[in-house]
Amino acid sequence: MLSIIAAITYTVGTRPYGYLGLGDVSVLVFFSWLSVAGTYYLQTHSFNNVMMLSATACGLLATEVLNINNLRDIDIDRANGKNTLAVQLWPQRARVYHVLLLSSAVLCPVHPVQSAQSVGLAVLTGDPAAGLSCPACTTRPNASRHETDAGAHGQGGAANPLAVRHRRGTQLKTDDFANRANKGI
């Protein structure tokens, strides 16, 4: 809901914040901490400093795109009363700001990509050992992880990595798209 309100008030209303030089801050917040770190939290139910730095790097790069567009339009924006950060900084300092955005993004750590890839691999293959663990299996000390259900979804005995069965016999559902992709549809 907050994202929708921010998108509307960026250019609409009596005092749109995009015309006050606050668009850069908004892009950083919504394209980094809320989107990247928020998605990470939804998948892992945790936050960590490294992920927040990586999210910040994504937001800095998105802010850089906004800044380069504002640099291009600096004369038009000034003539129309659109007081973007680039207009406030003037061209020379806006270029320095652009270099600072890029160098700051590069300096943020990017090694959480490996963790994100393992989470994605676990979701795609249905193998929690690839990055995710099932809370239902980890609550009992002697519970095994998962086993692949051979012959699931009419595969004629062939192992289907998308059909995961708990040893207790309950079936974990996978989405229809993943099942179709596995069947080659």
Image (cartoon, grey):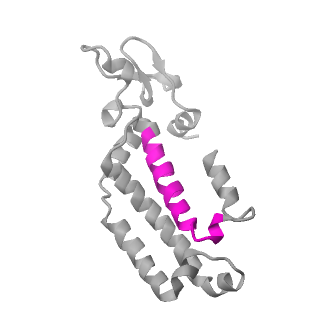
Q: Can residue 99 be seen in this view?
A: yes
Q: Quadrant of residue 76?
A: bottom right
79 sits to left or right of 157: right
Does residue 24 belong to the magenta stretch? Answer: yes
145 sits to left or right of 8: left
Does residue 160 belong to the magenta stretch? Answer: no
Foreground: 164 or 133?
A: 133
Foreground: 3 or 130?
A: 3
Spot occupied by residue 100 in the image (x, y as percentages of width and height): 39, 75
Q: Quadrant of the N terminus?
A: top right
Foreground: 132 or 162?
A: 132
Spot occupied by residue 133 in the image (x, y as percentages of width and height): 34, 28
Foreground: 139 or 182?
A: 139
**Which residue appears at 67% of the width and 77% of the height?**
82
**Which residue appears at 52% of the width and 71% of the height?**
65
Spot occupied by residue 149 in the image (x, y as percentages of width and height): 41, 22
Q: Quadrant of the C terminus?
A: top right
Magenta-drawn segment: 17-41
Outermost residue toward the top in this view: 168
43 sits to left or right of 144: right
In the rendered view, tell whether residue 134 sits above or below residue 120.
Answer: above
118 sits to left or right of 95: left
Marker count (numbered) = 0
Q: Is residue 124 visible?
A: no
Spot occupied by residue 31 in the image (x, y as percentages of width and height): 51, 57
Q: In which quarter of the image is residue 177?
A: top right
Q: Which SS type dominates the magenta stretch?
A: helix
